[in-house]
Amino acid sequence: MRRRIAWLDSAKGLGIIALLLFHAPGPQRLMDYISSFNMPLFFVISGYLFSLKKYEPADFLKRRIRSLVVPYFIFCAALLAFWVVFENLSEGKGLPDIPAAVSAIVYSCGQYMSGKDMIAVAAPLWFVTCLFVVEVGFFWLKRLLPRPRQVVLALLPLSIAGFLLADGRVAFRMPWGIDIALTAIVFYAAGYATGNISVPIAPRSPALKLIAAVAALAAGAGFCALNGPVSYNNMIYHNYFLLYLAAFGGIIGYALIAQLLHEFKPLLFLGRNTLLIFGFHLAGYHVINRILRFARVSTDLTVLWGFAYAAACVALLLPLIYFLNRYLPFAVGKQKQRPASEFAEVKAK
């Protein structure tokens, strides 16, 4: 079994906190900043863990279907039921257009899912199918082009194609985030390249690491301000160079902070349950909104309210996290853990 890298779990935890804040009530400037790096961060982390040597094509595809595609459809089925009952029937709206929602789920375009009268609670799951496309695409790219220079030369036209498809230049959206994947594969490749560097590239001193993190975050925020608000789901990129500069500034900054917080257990917990929180946090927010509406509590667009929403959402999801990890691990892309005694028996043989 592959040993977990603690700071990567911390980085995923930071990414999930940012995602929770992005979808919670809060100041627009914070949302704009988060959108500049948050989704690229997850692509970079996934690329960091990629290994071409471990799998043959059939085995690689099987594992990615099990870890991404199966959870995607299980989550969407559960969210579809939630949407029908909680968002429609309980509000007296009657049955929604279920065939249209199922079609949107199969097509897996977050922009279509979040449209009017559609299954918006499942919209963030566009990332899961897009990541599947990116991972399979990068796997074949590395097999066909083994030299790093060849990969770089291939990524350039792909990223340019992704940019040309963005910002409303093309009305048609591709299924499973294929159009987004043209841009996202650059972040995935960057993560893979970083994970294969044999010498340490981050400062070892915690003080220097913190200084470098602040500098990277400040640079990312500056590039974000110059580029304006972006949306990977809706393919709003603006400037090609500023898009990547803002994203990598945020990614580097939060990666360094994650290394400083690699033993912070709450962050590790969030990082190890990223997929589940990713999939169900909007449903949690809908429940919170219903409770606040019933209690006649008004909210403000402040960072404090954003953190309150995020904390309440994670608390709501704790029973679901425990249940799925304990009894249905395949639903979150995990294999059922064998008891320690069983490992001992295997080792003895």
Image (cartoon, helix red, strand yellow):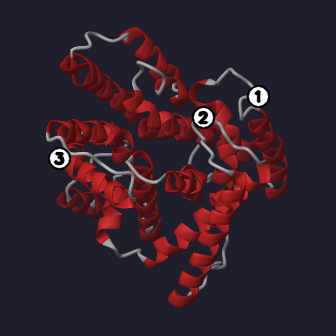
Q: What type is the residue that disc 3 sits on?
A: Pro
Residue 131 position, x and y percent, is 55, 41
Measured along the vertical axis of the image, is residue 93 above or below residue 74?
above
Residue depicted at 49% across the width and 74% down the height = 257
Along the line of sight, which residue is nearer the eye, 323 or 97?
A: 97
Residue depicted at 54% across the width and 74% down the height = 256
Residue depicted at 41% across the width and 16% down the height = 102
Residue 95 position, x and y percent, is 28, 10
Residue depicted at 43% across the width and 62% down the height = 14
Residue 277 position, x and y percent, is 34, 47
What residue does disc 2 label?
A: 234
Q: Is residue 11 left or right of residue 270?
A: right
What residue does disc 3 label?
A: 319
Residue 8 position, x and y percent, is 47, 65
Along the line of sight, which residue is nearer the eye, 300 or 20?
A: 300
Measured along the vertical axis of the image, is residue 179 above or below residue 303?
above
Q: Is residue 142 left or right of residue 4?
A: right
Disc 1 packing (10 Å; few <14; some 14–19; many ≥20): few
Measured along the vertical axis of the image, is residue 196 above or below residue 90?
below
Along the line of sight, which residue is nearer the eye, 66 or 212?
A: 212
Disc 2 packing (10 Å; few <14; some 14–19; many ≥20): some
Q: What type is the residue that disc 1 sits on?
A: Arg
Q: Is residue 196 visible?
A: no
Q: Is residue 17 visible?
A: yes
Alpha carbon separation for disc pair 2 and 1: 12 Å
Which structural element holds mark 2?
loop
